[in-house]
Structure formats: C-alpha cells, structure tokens
Image (spheres, grey):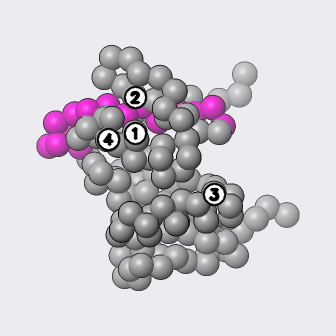
Amino acid sequence: MSVELNHTIVHARDNRESARFFADLLNLEITAEWGPFIAVALSNGVTLDFATVPADDIAPQHYAFLISEEEFDTAYARITERGIEHYADPHRQHPGTVNHNDGGRGVYFMDPAGHAMELITVPYGGRPS
C-alpha cells in the first residue's frame, strides 16, 4: 500500500464557520460531522477536519490547493464578491490581484481562523512534461 494523506485537522475559532467558508468558496461538500469535527472532502479523498479550539491555541498554518482554471475563476469571483482581502504574494505586498507564476494563476487570502490559504492553477515549477 502506498502512503497517502487521509485527513488533517484544521484548528478554527468556529468549526462550522471555517468549514462553510472553505466549502462555499471552492464548491466543496461538508461530508461528515462527528464529535468536534466537521469534515470537508477534497477531490483526492483527503478531508479537512475542522475543529473548534480556543483562539490562543490556533497556530496559523498555510494550506495550498491546486485547482483547475475554471475552479479558480469561480473561487476568485467569490473572493472578490465577498470583499475578502487577497494578494498575489504570501508577503501581502500586492493586494487585490493574482500572480501568474509558473504559467498559471495564484492568490493568497486568510480564512476566518487566520490560516493562510493559497489557490494555484499550476504546481510550483510548472506543469510536468
């Protein structure tokens, strides 16, 4: 059996708010709720399991998602429609725009718990040959 990531826990101030924010933005489904977790399924079978924790216990993380051009168009439209601050770069030097790194598009923004989210249409280094 090969090694695959199955799920990861994402700390949130409010698990429902963070799961809904993420699922709505990327047109994903909340697939399960159990105990302190609300799971959002990604297309490769991995789930992000959002858990409410005290705000002082949230260590900001970075989550990057490879999506199609069409998914990017939809997500970026939602980002702009909702007035979500976004940047072309992780250092927040280029607000309100996207990057075109590696021949694709990318954008950075924060989720409700303060995690740095990144959407890209081409993996770092470009498309495989």
Q: Earlier in the sequence, mark 3 or mark 1?
A: 1
Residue 64 on image: x %, y % = 51, 55
Mark 4 Cα shell of 10 Å, populated few (<14), some (14-19), many (≥20): some
Which numbered disc covers residue 108? Answer: none
Mark 2 / mark 1, whichever is N-terminal: 1
User: As shown in the figure, which amino acid type bears the numbered disc 3?
Assistant: Glu
Name the side, left or right, on which 92 lies relative to 89. Answer: left
Please state which of the two labelled residues, at mark 4 or mark 2, is closer to the viewer.
4
Label 3 or label 2, whichever comes before in sequence order: 2
Residue found at x 53% / y 35%: 29
Say which residue label 2 marks.
38
Say which amino acid is labelled 2: Ile
List x then y, in percent, for residue 49.
42, 31
Query: Residue at horizontal 68%, vertical 61%?
Result: 70
Q: Which mark is residue 71?
A: 3
Viewer-nearest residue: 74 or 101: 74
Is residue 5 shown in magenta? no
The quadrant where residue 10 appears: top left
Q: Is residue 116 above or below residue 113?
A: below
Q: Residue furthest bottom?
A: 94
Can you tell which mark lies on residue 17? 4
Look at the image and give the residue range highlighted in magenta: 44-58
Q: Within 10 angstroms of label 3, few (less than 14), some, or many (20 or more) residues?
A: some
Q: Are marks 1 and 4 in contact (CB under 8 Å)?
A: yes
Q: How far from the left and from the top, in percent, is residue 67?
A: 64, 55
Disc 2 vs disc 1: Cβ atoms closer than 8 Å? yes
Image point (35%, 53%), residue name: 111
Q: Nearer the viewer, residue 113 or 57?
A: 113
Q: Which residue is mark 1?
A: 19
Which percent across, then down, holds residue 6?
A: 56, 29
